[in-house]
Structures are given as C-alpha cells and as structure tokens.
C-alpha cells in the first residue's frame, strides 16, 4: 500500500495537522507505475481512468497533472516519487528534464535509506 501524508501549511503559531491516506498499490497511478515499472506523465489526472480521487476528496486538493517515477533496484520497485500540478507558462505536462531530476532525487534518496538501514543493522549486531 502507498501511504500518503497529507495536510496543509499551519497558520502562524500553530502546528501542522498531518493525516495519512492509505491506497492499495493495486489501484491508482502509483500502483500503475509500480506494475509497469515505467514513469507516468499525465497531463489531466481526472481524464485518466487509473487516477484515484481519494486523496483529493479527503483533502480538498485539486490534482491536475501528475508525474510518477518508480525507483528501482535489482528489478524491484523500492519507491515511487510523485510530483503534481506542473506550473509552467507554456504547459502543464512535465518534461523529460522533470522526469530525469525526479530519478536523480529518487536514487539519491534510495541510497541514503539503504545506508541508514545498513548502519542500523550494523549497530544492532554490535550491541
């Protein structure tokens, strides 16, 4: 399942309220990215039959365009990074550069997470 933290920017002097929305990987665009192991670049989410409106319905957010990039290692999807609502003067569709940059961030993140897990296992073994 995908766990999507949602919330809004807090008012000055108050704490942010976060709520997780859990979506099965058998549905939605993230699930499609996992199954296909390919990036998805959707210009209008509401016109795509795989788009799951649950997060929009629960948060009041309005998703327009979406870019989903699966981060893989050894033929297995570790994560899917998602960007929403491209805001450019000439297009709402994400570009190849956007996709590349999301891959760069995703693989850097995956390496850091793996190093943290390795260090955590090592620390447990030493104790």
Image (cartoon, helix red, strand yellow):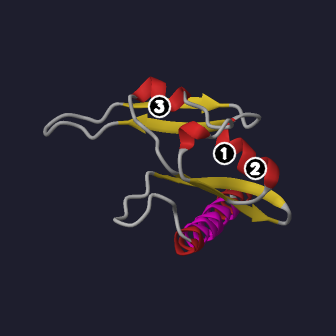
Residue occupying the point 80% across, 53% down: 36
Residue denoted by label 3:
56
Say which quarter of the image contains residue 54.
top right
Q: Is residue 102 above or below residue 4?
A: below
Measure the alpha-carbon separation of dots 2 and 1: 6 Å
Looking at the image, residue 103 sits to the left or right of residue 34; the answer is left
Q: Callout 3 environment at 10 Å: few (<14), some (14 to 19), or many (20+)?
A: few
Determine contact: label 2, label 1, CB under 8 Å: yes
Foreground of the two, 1 or 29: 29
| Element type where label 1 sits in the image | helix
Looking at the image, residue 16 sits to the left or right of residue 97; the answer is left
Q: Callout 1 environment at 10 Å: few (<14), some (14 to 19), or many (20+)?
A: many
Residue 120 is situated, as x and y percent measured from the top left of the image, at 65, 58
Residue denoted by label 1:
30
The magenta segment: 102-118
Residue 73 is situated, as x and y percent measured from the top left of the image, at 78, 65
Quadrant housing the N terminus:
top right
Measure the alpha-carbon separation of dots 2 and 3: 21 Å
Foreground of the two, 69 or 95: 95
Foreground of the two, 73 or 62: 62
Residue denoted by label 2:
34
Q: Is residue 52 above or below residue 116?
A: above
């Amino acid at each position: 399942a995908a766990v999507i933290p949602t919330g809004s920017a807090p008012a000055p002097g108050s704490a942010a309220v976060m709520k997780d929305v859990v979506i099965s990987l058998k549905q939605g665009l993230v699930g499609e990215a996992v199954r296909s192991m390919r990036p998805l670049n959707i210009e209008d989410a509401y016109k795509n039959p795989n788009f799951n409106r649950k997060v929009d319905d629960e948060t009041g957010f309005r998703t327009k365009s979406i870019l989903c990039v699966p981060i893989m290692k050894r033929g297995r999807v570790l994560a899917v990074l998602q960007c929403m609502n491209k805001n450019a003067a000439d297009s709402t569709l994400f570009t190849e550069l956007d996709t590349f940059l999301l891959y760069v961030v995703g693989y850097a993140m995956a390496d850091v997470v793996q190093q943290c897990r390795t260090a955590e296992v090592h620390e447990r073994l030493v104790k």
